[in-house]
Amino acid sequence: MADKNSTVIIFILSVISNLVFFAGLAIFFFLFYASYSIFNLSAVLLPFFLFLLLVLFLWKYSYLKDIRRGRTMLLVIAILSFIPPLFLVDFLGENEEKLNFTTEKWFNNPDDRVYIVYDFLEENQIIGKSKKDIQQLLGAPEGNSLYSENNVMEYLLGLEPGLIRMDSSYLIIWLNEDDKVIDYDIITGLKYNSNLCFLYHL
């Protein structure tokens, strides 16, 4: 009887911990716009496979294999266990689409710029591009920028990603005398002060 009780307790705790883990993972993916990566996919699939191994072990070696109701319960839970990882993999795919940069997204969803700016920088390799090239993709820098006269272009990206979103993020692009991009940075929480920006960049 003790063995049966232990088996039931272990199984119930495994189911609960699995659900709590996937719920926490879903919240993390939502808050940080997580997309496809080896790390994220591993975080989804490894716990899922471990849980299936536990179900298979109970199916073969626990007293549940000798009870029709026990076998039915294990089969139903094994099938239902596919739902959370499939949902999360699909969710990662949706985030992947959201993170892809397009000029249309940049203009129509300014609050999401902080998420798509990394795809923009990776795809366009802006070092060496002209000021005109950048403006064709991102538009003119914000009108209230204090850097426009100092060979610097500034774009507001929206609030920083994360659970507590308090500070704004900015894409700062440095130009040389020929209006060619020589460097860029993404900064968070700094005031509109060219001296501070210069010190931060160094």
Image (cartoon, rainbow, N blue to C red):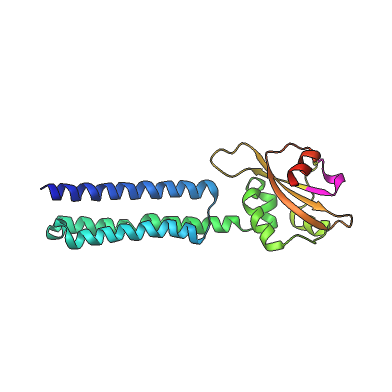
| Position of residue 39 in the picture relative to residue 107 (left or right) | left
| Front one among 132 and 41 | 41
Q: Position of residue 74 (x, y in %)?
A: 23, 57
- At x 82%, y 40%, the residue is 146
- At x 29%, y 50%, the residue is 14
Is residue 144 at least partly visible in the picture?
no
| Front one among 2 and 136 | 2
Q: Is residue 180 above or below residue 194?
A: below
Q: Is residue 188 above or below residue 129?
A: above
- At x 38%, y 54%, the residue is 84
Q: Residue furthest front?
A: 202
Is residue 22 covered in magenta?
no
Q: Magenta segment, which residues? A: 146-153
How many numbered marks are there? 0
Q: Position of residue 175 (x, y in %)?
A: 83, 53
Q: Is residue 164 above or below residue 103?
A: above
Q: Position of residue 140 (x, y in %)?
A: 79, 50
Q: Position of residue 134 (x, y in %)?
A: 78, 57
Q: Residue furthest left?
A: 1
Is residue 151 covered in magenta?
yes
**Image quadrant of residue 56?**
bottom left
